[in-house]
Protein backbone atom coordinates (compact mmCIF):
# COMPACT_ATOMS: atom_id res chain seq x y z
CA UNK A 1 0.00 0.00 0.00
CA UNK A 2 1.52 3.30 -0.96
CA UNK A 3 1.35 5.74 1.92
CA UNK A 4 0.20 8.59 -0.34
CA UNK A 5 -3.08 6.74 -0.81
CA UNK A 6 -3.65 6.55 2.93
CA UNK A 7 -3.22 10.25 3.51
CA UNK A 8 -6.49 12.01 4.11
CA UNK A 9 -7.26 14.03 1.02
CA UNK A 10 -8.40 17.60 1.51
CA UNK A 11 -12.11 18.09 0.92
CA UNK A 12 -11.57 20.00 -2.29
CA UNK A 13 -9.53 17.26 -3.95
CA UNK A 14 -11.47 15.28 -6.56
CA UNK A 15 -12.51 11.72 -5.75
CA UNK A 16 -11.64 9.42 -8.67
CA UNK A 17 -14.00 6.54 -9.51
CA UNK A 18 -11.20 4.04 -9.08
CA UNK A 19 -7.68 4.01 -7.78
CA UNK A 20 -5.69 0.82 -8.32
CA UNK A 21 -3.45 -0.41 -5.52
CA UNK A 22 -0.31 -2.23 -6.68
CA UNK A 23 1.61 -3.11 -3.54
CA UNK A 24 5.40 -2.76 -3.23
CA UNK A 25 5.47 -6.57 -2.80
CA UNK A 26 3.74 -6.94 -6.17
CA UNK A 27 6.30 -4.67 -7.82
CA UNK A 28 9.13 -6.67 -6.29
CA UNK A 29 7.47 -9.90 -7.43
CA UNK A 30 7.19 -8.60 -11.01
CA UNK A 31 10.90 -7.74 -10.89
CA UNK A 32 11.68 -11.23 -9.61
CA UNK A 33 9.69 -12.82 -12.44
CA UNK A 34 11.40 -10.63 -15.04
CA UNK A 35 14.84 -11.36 -13.58
CA UNK A 36 14.07 -15.09 -13.55
CA UNK A 37 14.16 -14.98 -17.34
CA UNK A 38 11.10 -17.16 -17.92
CA UNK A 39 8.56 -14.33 -18.25
CA UNK A 40 5.76 -16.24 -20.02
CA UNK A 41 3.59 -19.02 -18.51
CA UNK A 42 5.75 -20.99 -16.08
CA UNK A 43 6.33 -21.76 -12.41
CA UNK A 44 4.79 -18.50 -11.07
CA UNK A 45 1.54 -19.31 -12.89
CA UNK A 46 1.51 -22.80 -11.41
CA UNK A 47 1.98 -21.42 -7.89
CA UNK A 48 -0.66 -18.71 -8.40
CA UNK A 49 -3.13 -21.38 -9.51
CA UNK A 50 -2.39 -23.47 -6.44
CA UNK A 51 -2.76 -20.52 -4.04
CA UNK A 52 -5.88 -19.19 -5.75
CA UNK A 53 -7.62 -22.59 -5.67
CA UNK A 54 -6.88 -22.77 -1.95
CA UNK A 55 -8.26 -19.25 -1.44
CA UNK A 56 -11.63 -20.05 -3.05
CA UNK A 57 -11.80 -23.68 -1.95
CA UNK A 58 -11.81 -25.28 -5.41
CA UNK A 59 -9.93 -28.42 -6.44
CA UNK A 60 -8.48 -26.79 -9.56
CA UNK A 61 -7.64 -23.34 -10.89
CA UNK A 62 -6.44 -22.49 -14.39
CA UNK A 63 -4.97 -19.03 -14.99
CA UNK A 64 -5.88 -17.27 -18.22
CA UNK A 65 -5.51 -13.86 -19.85
CA UNK A 66 -8.90 -12.41 -18.82
CA UNK A 67 -12.30 -13.25 -17.36
CA UNK A 68 -13.71 -12.93 -20.88
CA UNK A 69 -11.33 -15.69 -22.04
CA UNK A 70 -12.18 -17.68 -18.89
CA UNK A 71 -15.88 -17.55 -19.81
CA UNK A 72 -15.27 -18.56 -23.42
CA UNK A 73 -12.95 -21.43 -22.46
CA UNK A 74 -15.37 -22.66 -19.78
CA UNK A 75 -18.34 -22.57 -22.15
CA UNK A 76 -16.30 -24.38 -24.84
CA UNK A 77 -15.32 -27.00 -22.27
CA UNK A 78 -19.02 -27.85 -21.72
CA UNK A 79 -18.92 -29.29 -25.28
CA UNK A 80 -22.42 -28.14 -26.20
CA UNK A 81 -23.72 -28.45 -29.76
CA UNK A 82 -22.97 -25.39 -31.93
CA UNK A 83 -25.82 -22.91 -31.64
CA UNK A 84 -26.90 -24.18 -28.21
CA UNK A 85 -28.80 -21.55 -26.19
CA UNK A 86 -27.14 -20.00 -23.14
CA UNK A 87 -29.09 -17.90 -20.65
CA UNK A 88 -27.34 -14.73 -19.48
CA UNK A 89 -28.58 -11.66 -17.63
CA UNK A 90 -29.12 -8.65 -19.91
CA UNK A 91 -27.62 -6.52 -17.12
CA UNK A 92 -24.01 -7.60 -17.60
CA UNK A 93 -20.76 -6.61 -19.26
CA UNK A 94 -20.69 -6.83 -23.07
CA UNK A 95 -17.54 -8.98 -23.03
CA UNK A 96 -19.31 -11.70 -21.09
CA UNK A 97 -21.87 -12.00 -23.90
CA UNK A 98 -19.19 -11.88 -26.61
CA UNK A 99 -17.68 -14.93 -24.87
CA UNK A 100 -20.90 -16.88 -25.46
CA UNK A 101 -20.98 -15.86 -29.13
CA UNK A 102 -17.29 -16.66 -29.69
CA UNK A 103 -17.85 -20.09 -28.14
CA UNK A 104 -20.27 -20.74 -31.02
CA UNK A 105 -23.34 -20.50 -28.79
CA UNK A 106 -26.44 -18.30 -28.76
CA UNK A 107 -27.03 -15.88 -25.84
CA UNK A 108 -30.59 -15.68 -24.52
CA UNK A 109 -31.05 -12.50 -22.48
CA UNK A 110 -32.73 -12.79 -19.07
CA UNK A 111 -34.43 -9.85 -17.36
CA UNK A 112 -33.31 -8.77 -13.87
CA UNK A 113 -35.02 -7.72 -10.67
CA UNK A 114 -34.61 -3.93 -10.58
CA UNK A 115 -33.64 -4.06 -6.88
CA UNK A 116 -31.03 -6.83 -6.84
CA UNK A 117 -29.97 -6.21 -10.48
CA UNK A 118 -29.91 -10.00 -10.90
CA UNK A 119 -32.43 -12.41 -12.43
CA UNK A 120 -35.01 -13.99 -10.11
CA UNK A 121 -36.02 -17.62 -10.66
CA UNK A 122 -39.22 -16.48 -12.46
CA UNK A 123 -37.13 -14.39 -14.89
CA UNK A 124 -34.94 -17.40 -15.64
CA UNK A 125 -37.92 -19.72 -16.10
CA UNK A 126 -39.69 -17.32 -18.46
CA UNK A 127 -36.56 -16.70 -20.58
CA UNK A 128 -35.98 -20.46 -20.79
CA UNK A 129 -39.53 -21.07 -21.97
CA UNK A 130 -39.42 -18.10 -24.37
CA UNK A 131 -36.48 -19.71 -26.21
CA UNK A 132 -37.83 -23.26 -26.01
CA UNK A 133 -35.37 -24.44 -23.34
CA UNK A 134 -31.71 -23.63 -22.81
CA UNK A 135 -28.65 -25.85 -22.72
CA UNK A 136 -26.54 -23.77 -20.31
CA UNK A 137 -26.61 -20.63 -18.19
CA UNK A 138 -24.19 -17.94 -17.05
CA UNK A 139 -24.87 -16.66 -13.53
CA UNK A 140 -23.48 -13.23 -12.59
CA UNK A 141 -22.87 -12.25 -8.96
CA UNK A 142 -23.69 -8.61 -9.63
CA UNK A 143 -21.44 -6.13 -7.88
CA UNK A 144 -20.23 -8.96 -5.63
CA UNK A 145 -23.66 -9.83 -4.20
CA UNK A 146 -24.33 -13.55 -3.82
CA UNK A 147 -26.57 -15.02 -6.56
CA UNK A 148 -28.52 -18.14 -5.58
CA UNK A 149 -26.78 -20.34 -8.16
CA UNK A 150 -28.59 -23.58 -7.30
CA UNK A 151 -32.05 -21.99 -7.19
CA UNK A 152 -31.48 -20.33 -10.57
CA UNK A 153 -30.20 -23.60 -12.10
CA UNK A 154 -33.36 -25.32 -10.93
CA UNK A 155 -35.51 -22.56 -12.42
CA UNK A 156 -33.70 -23.07 -15.74
CA UNK A 157 -34.11 -26.87 -15.39
CA UNK A 158 -30.36 -27.24 -15.76
CA UNK A 159 -27.92 -29.32 -13.72
CA UNK A 160 -25.13 -27.34 -12.01
CA UNK A 161 -22.77 -28.95 -14.54
CA UNK A 162 -24.34 -26.70 -17.20
CA UNK A 163 -23.90 -23.51 -15.20
CA UNK A 164 -20.88 -21.21 -15.53
CA UNK A 165 -20.47 -18.43 -12.97
CA UNK A 166 -19.25 -15.00 -14.00
CA UNK A 167 -17.47 -14.10 -10.76
CA UNK A 168 -15.68 -11.04 -12.16
CA UNK A 169 -17.15 -9.12 -9.18
CA UNK A 170 -17.27 -12.03 -6.79
CA UNK A 171 -13.84 -12.93 -5.48
CA UNK A 172 -14.65 -13.16 -1.71
CA UNK A 173 -18.41 -13.67 -2.23
CA UNK A 174 -20.09 -16.53 -0.37
CA UNK A 175 -23.39 -18.12 -1.37
CA UNK A 176 -24.85 -19.44 1.85
CA UNK A 177 -21.77 -20.67 3.67
CA UNK A 178 -19.93 -21.55 0.49
CA UNK A 179 -17.19 -19.55 -1.23
CA UNK A 180 -17.85 -18.75 -4.88
CA UNK A 181 -15.39 -20.94 -6.80
CA UNK A 182 -16.67 -24.51 -6.73
CA UNK A 183 -20.47 -24.30 -6.85
CA UNK A 184 -21.06 -24.71 -10.60
CA UNK A 185 -19.19 -26.43 -13.46
CA UNK A 186 -16.75 -23.52 -13.77
CA UNK A 187 -16.30 -20.16 -12.07
CA UNK A 188 -14.60 -17.28 -13.89
CA UNK A 189 -12.69 -14.51 -12.12
CA UNK A 190 -11.15 -11.25 -13.40
CA UNK A 191 -7.93 -9.51 -12.41
CA UNK A 192 -8.66 -6.45 -14.54
CA UNK A 193 -7.28 -3.21 -13.07
CA UNK A 194 -10.52 -2.17 -11.34
CA UNK A 195 -11.47 -5.58 -9.90
CA UNK A 196 -11.02 -6.76 -6.30
CA UNK A 197 -7.65 -8.44 -7.02
CA UNK A 198 -6.03 -6.11 -9.53
CA UNK A 199 -3.15 -7.33 -11.70
CA UNK A 200 -3.95 -5.19 -14.72
CA UNK A 201 -5.21 -7.97 -16.93
CA UNK A 202 -5.84 -11.61 -16.17
CA UNK A 203 -8.45 -14.20 -15.31
CA UNK A 204 -8.94 -17.57 -13.63
CA UNK A 205 -11.20 -20.57 -14.11
CA UNK A 206 -11.86 -22.59 -10.96
CA UNK A 207 -13.61 -25.96 -10.86
CA UNK A 208 -13.83 -29.22 -8.95
CA UNK A 209 -13.99 -31.17 -12.23
CA UNK A 210 -10.50 -32.45 -13.19
CA UNK A 211 -11.53 -33.10 -16.79
CA UNK A 212 -12.90 -29.60 -17.27
CA UNK A 213 -9.74 -28.16 -15.69
CA UNK A 214 -7.62 -30.21 -18.08
CA UNK A 215 -9.63 -29.09 -21.13
CA UNK A 216 -9.37 -25.41 -20.16
CA UNK A 217 -5.66 -25.88 -19.39
CA UNK A 218 -4.98 -27.20 -22.89
CA UNK A 219 -7.30 -24.81 -24.66
CA UNK A 220 -5.78 -21.69 -23.13
CA UNK A 221 -2.54 -22.30 -25.08
CA UNK A 222 -3.43 -23.36 -28.61
CA UNK A 223 -4.75 -26.76 -27.49
CA UNK A 224 -1.19 -28.02 -27.11
CA UNK A 225 -0.51 -30.95 -24.81
CA UNK A 226 -0.54 -29.90 -21.19
CA UNK A 227 3.12 -29.52 -20.52
CA UNK A 228 3.96 -27.80 -23.78
CA UNK A 229 5.69 -24.92 -22.02
CA UNK A 230 8.23 -27.33 -20.61
CA UNK A 231 9.46 -28.14 -24.08
CA UNK A 232 12.03 -25.34 -23.89
CA UNK A 233 13.43 -26.53 -20.56
CA UNK A 234 16.62 -28.60 -20.48
CA UNK A 235 15.64 -32.13 -21.34
CA UNK A 236 12.32 -30.95 -22.80
CA UNK A 237 11.05 -32.33 -26.05
CA UNK A 238 9.92 -30.44 -29.14
CA UNK A 239 7.11 -32.93 -29.64
CA UNK A 240 3.55 -31.98 -28.82
CA UNK A 241 0.06 -32.71 -29.98
CA UNK A 242 -2.88 -30.37 -30.57
CA UNK A 243 -6.19 -32.06 -29.83
CA UNK A 244 -8.65 -29.12 -29.64
CA UNK A 245 -9.04 -25.77 -31.43
CA UNK A 246 -7.42 -23.72 -28.67
CA UNK A 247 -7.11 -20.04 -27.92
CA UNK A 248 -4.06 -17.94 -27.08
CA UNK A 249 -5.23 -17.00 -23.60
CA UNK A 250 -2.45 -18.00 -21.22
CA UNK A 251 -1.27 -15.86 -18.29
CA UNK A 252 2.35 -14.69 -18.06
CA UNK A 253 4.62 -15.41 -15.08
CA UNK A 254 4.97 -11.65 -14.57
CA UNK A 255 1.20 -11.31 -14.09
CA UNK A 256 1.04 -14.39 -11.87
CA UNK A 257 3.85 -13.10 -9.65
CA UNK A 258 1.94 -9.83 -9.20
CA UNK A 259 -1.27 -11.78 -8.50
CA UNK A 260 0.39 -13.94 -5.84
CA UNK A 261 1.71 -10.89 -4.02
CA UNK A 262 -1.64 -9.06 -4.29
CA UNK A 263 -3.55 -12.13 -3.02
CA UNK A 264 -1.83 -11.71 0.36
CA UNK A 265 -3.55 -8.32 0.75
CA UNK A 266 -7.00 -9.45 -0.34
CA UNK A 267 -8.49 -10.10 3.12
CA UNK A 268 -7.46 -6.66 4.34
CA UNK A 269 -8.78 -5.00 1.19
CA UNK A 270 -12.08 -6.82 1.54
CA UNK A 271 -12.44 -5.65 5.15
CA UNK A 272 -11.94 -2.11 3.93
CA UNK A 273 -14.51 -2.52 1.13
CA UNK A 274 -17.06 -3.76 3.69
CA UNK A 275 -16.32 -0.77 5.96
CA UNK A 276 -16.77 1.65 3.07
CA UNK A 277 -20.08 0.02 2.08
CA UNK A 278 -21.26 0.32 5.68
CA UNK A 279 -20.30 3.99 5.89
CA UNK A 280 -21.98 4.76 2.55
CA UNK A 281 -25.19 3.02 3.63
CA UNK A 282 -25.26 4.82 6.97
CA UNK A 283 -24.72 8.28 5.46
CA UNK A 284 -26.84 7.87 2.34
CA UNK A 285 -29.85 6.33 4.11
CA UNK A 286 -30.76 9.86 5.29
CA UNK A 287 -31.06 11.20 1.74
CA UNK A 288 -34.49 11.15 0.06
CA UNK A 289 -34.51 9.97 -3.55
CA UNK A 290 -31.56 7.60 -3.17
CA UNK A 291 -32.11 3.85 -2.98
CA UNK A 292 -29.28 1.89 -1.38
CA UNK A 293 -27.89 -1.35 -2.80
CA UNK A 294 -29.52 -4.50 -1.47
CA UNK A 295 -27.37 -6.14 1.15
CA UNK A 296 -29.75 -9.09 1.35
CA UNK A 297 -29.17 -12.45 -0.23
CA UNK A 298 -27.88 -15.42 1.63
CA UNK A 299 -24.11 -15.25 1.97
CA UNK A 300 -21.35 -12.67 1.87
CA UNK A 301 -21.05 -9.60 -0.36
CA UNK A 302 -17.65 -8.85 -1.96
CA UNK A 303 -18.51 -5.16 -2.51
CA UNK A 304 -16.82 -4.85 -5.88
CA UNK A 305 -19.36 -2.13 -6.66
CA UNK A 306 -21.52 0.16 -4.57
CA UNK A 307 -24.53 0.84 -6.81
CA UNK A 308 -27.19 3.33 -5.75
CA UNK A 309 -30.41 4.01 -7.65
CA UNK A 310 -32.21 7.29 -8.08
CA UNK A 311 -35.95 7.47 -7.40
CA UNK A 312 -38.36 10.18 -8.65
CA UNK A 313 -38.22 11.74 -5.17
CA UNK A 314 -34.67 12.95 -5.93
CA UNK A 315 -36.07 15.52 -8.34
CA UNK A 316 -33.27 14.98 -10.87
CA UNK A 317 -32.45 12.09 -13.18
CA UNK A 318 -29.53 9.69 -12.78
CA UNK A 319 -27.75 11.43 -15.66
CA UNK A 320 -28.18 14.81 -13.96
CA UNK A 321 -26.99 13.38 -10.64
CA UNK A 322 -23.86 11.96 -12.34
CA UNK A 323 -23.18 15.31 -14.06
CA UNK A 324 -23.67 17.29 -10.84
CA UNK A 325 -21.38 14.92 -8.93
CA UNK A 326 -18.72 15.22 -11.65
CA UNK A 327 -18.98 18.99 -11.41
CA UNK A 328 -18.43 18.64 -7.64
CA UNK A 329 -15.30 16.54 -8.27
CA UNK A 330 -16.83 13.11 -7.62
CA UNK A 331 -16.43 10.59 -10.45
CA UNK A 332 -19.03 7.85 -10.87
CA UNK A 333 -19.79 5.15 -13.40
CA UNK A 334 -22.73 3.08 -14.67
CA UNK A 335 -22.82 -0.72 -14.45
CA UNK A 336 -24.00 -1.57 -16.94
CA UNK A 337 -25.50 -0.32 -20.14
CA UNK A 338 -27.60 -3.47 -20.69
CA UNK A 339 -26.29 -5.47 -23.63
CA UNK A 340 -29.52 -5.28 -25.67
CA UNK A 341 -29.15 -1.47 -25.71
CA UNK A 342 -25.76 -1.75 -27.49
CA UNK A 343 -25.94 -1.66 -31.28
CA UNK A 344 -23.99 -4.83 -32.04
CA UNK A 345 -26.24 -6.93 -29.81
CA UNK A 346 -29.39 -5.25 -31.09
CA UNK A 347 -28.25 -6.36 -34.54
CA UNK A 348 -27.11 -9.85 -33.49
CA UNK A 349 -29.82 -10.77 -30.97
CA UNK A 350 -32.78 -8.76 -32.23
CA UNK A 351 -34.77 -5.92 -30.73
CA UNK A 352 -35.69 -6.66 -27.11
CA UNK A 353 -37.93 -3.62 -26.77
CA UNK A 354 -40.40 -4.23 -23.92
CA UNK A 355 -39.08 -7.75 -23.20
CA UNK A 356 -36.72 -6.77 -20.36
CA UNK A 357 -38.67 -4.23 -18.28
CA UNK A 358 -36.77 -4.74 -15.01
CA UNK A 359 -33.44 -4.28 -16.77
CA UNK A 360 -34.59 -1.22 -18.72
CA UNK A 361 -35.97 0.49 -15.65
CA UNK A 362 -32.87 -0.22 -13.52
CA UNK A 363 -30.61 0.92 -16.37
CA UNK A 364 -32.08 4.43 -16.12
CA UNK A 365 -31.49 4.65 -12.36
CA UNK A 366 -28.22 2.88 -11.42
CA UNK A 367 -25.10 4.80 -10.50
CA UNK A 368 -21.88 3.27 -9.19
CA UNK A 369 -20.11 5.33 -6.53
CA UNK A 370 -16.32 5.19 -5.98
CA UNK A 371 -15.40 1.99 -4.11
CA UNK A 372 -11.81 0.84 -3.58
CA UNK A 373 -9.71 -0.11 -0.55
CA UNK A 374 -7.48 2.96 -0.84
CA UNK A 375 -10.51 5.23 -0.33
CA UNK A 376 -10.42 7.19 2.93
CA UNK A 377 -13.38 7.87 5.24
CA UNK A 378 -13.01 11.55 4.33
CA UNK A 379 -13.46 10.68 0.66
CA UNK A 380 -16.56 8.58 1.41
CA UNK A 381 -17.98 11.50 3.40
CA UNK A 382 -17.17 13.85 0.56
CA UNK A 383 -19.08 11.65 -1.93
CA UNK A 384 -22.09 11.48 0.43
CA UNK A 385 -22.05 15.25 1.01
CA UNK A 386 -22.04 15.81 -2.75
CA UNK A 387 -25.02 13.46 -3.19
CA UNK A 388 -26.84 15.24 -0.34
CA UNK A 389 -26.19 18.62 -2.02
CA UNK A 390 -27.74 17.38 -5.26
CA UNK A 391 -30.75 16.00 -3.37
CA UNK A 392 -31.23 19.29 -1.51
CA UNK A 393 -31.07 21.27 -4.75
CA UNK A 394 -33.66 18.86 -6.19
CA UNK A 395 -36.02 19.49 -3.25
CA UNK A 396 -35.58 23.24 -3.66
CA UNK A 397 -36.26 22.98 -7.39
CA UNK A 398 -39.47 21.01 -6.77
CA UNK A 399 -40.61 23.56 -4.19
CA UNK A 400 -40.10 26.35 -6.71
CA UNK A 401 -41.95 24.35 -9.37
CA UNK A 402 -44.89 23.71 -7.00
CA UNK A 403 -44.94 27.39 -6.06
CA UNK A 404 -45.03 28.33 -9.74
CA UNK A 405 -47.97 25.98 -10.35
CA UNK A 406 -50.02 27.18 -7.34
CA UNK A 407 -49.31 30.87 -8.09
C1 LIG B 1 -14.96 -7.03 -15.87
C2 LIG B 1 -16.04 -8.01 -16.20
C3 LIG B 1 -15.83 -9.06 -17.10
C4 LIG B 1 -14.60 -9.15 -17.97
O1 LIG B 1 -13.42 -9.26 -17.28
P1 LIG B 1 -12.04 -9.15 -18.09
O2 LIG B 1 -11.04 -9.78 -17.17
O3 LIG B 1 -11.79 -7.71 -18.33
O4 LIG B 1 -12.20 -9.92 -19.36
C5 LIG B 1 -16.82 -10.00 -17.26
N1 LIG B 1 -17.99 -9.90 -16.61
C6 LIG B 1 -18.25 -8.90 -15.75
C7 LIG B 1 -19.56 -8.87 -15.04
C8 LIG B 1 -17.28 -7.91 -15.54
O5 LIG B 1 -17.55 -6.87 -14.73
Image (cartoon, rainbow, N blue to C red):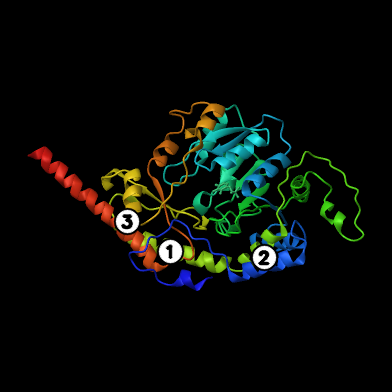
Nearest the camera: 199 or 110? Answer: 199
Whether pointer 1 and pointer 2 mark residues with C-beta atoms closer than 8 Å, the reply is: no
Question: Residue most toward the left?
Answer: 407
Q: Is residue 387 above or below residue 124?
A: below
Q: Is residue 273 left or right of residue 258?
A: left
Q: Which of the image's four quarters has the N terminus?
A: bottom right
- Please tell me the numbered disc located at residue 328: 3
Q: Identify the element where label 3 is drawn.
A: loop
- What residue did someone put label 2 on? 30
Q: Which of the image's four quarters has the C terminus?
A: top left
Q: Earlier in the sequence, mark 2 or mark 3?
A: 2
Give the CA distance from mark 1 to mark 3: 20 Å
Q: Earlier in the sequence, mark 1 or mark 2?
A: 2
Nearest the camera: 299 or 373? Answer: 373
Q: Is residue 82 left or right of residue 92?
A: right
- Please tell me the numbered disc located at residue 327: none
| Residue sitting at x 63%, y 34% | 101
| Residue sitting at x 56%, y 57% | 173
Whether pointer 2 and pointer 3 mark residues with C-beta atoms closer than 8 Å, the reply is: no
Q: Identify the element where label 1 is drawn.
A: helix
- What residue did someone put label 1 on? 276
On the question of residue 145 being in view, the answer is: no
Which label lies toward us, 1 or 3?
A: 3
Dot 1 beta carbon under 8 Å from ligand 1: no
Q: Identify the element where label 2 is drawn.
A: helix
**Residue 289 horizontal/vertical position (percent):** 29, 49
**Residue 165 horizontal/vertical position (percent):** 61, 47
Whether pointer 1 and pointer 3 mark residues with C-beta atoms closer than 8 Å, the reply is: no
Q: Is residue 303 left or right of residue 183?
A: left
Amino acid sequence: MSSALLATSPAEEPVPFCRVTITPEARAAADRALAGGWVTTGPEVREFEREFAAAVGSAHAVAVSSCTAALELSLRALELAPGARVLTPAMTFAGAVHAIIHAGLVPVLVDVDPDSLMPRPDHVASAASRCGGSQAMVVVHFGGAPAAVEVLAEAARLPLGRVVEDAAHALWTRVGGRAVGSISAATCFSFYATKNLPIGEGGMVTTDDPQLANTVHRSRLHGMSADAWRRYLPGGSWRYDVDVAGLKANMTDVSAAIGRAQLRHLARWQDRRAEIACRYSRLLSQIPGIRLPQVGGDGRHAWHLYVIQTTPELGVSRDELAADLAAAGVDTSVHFIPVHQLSYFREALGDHHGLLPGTDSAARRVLSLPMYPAMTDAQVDRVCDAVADVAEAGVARRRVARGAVSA
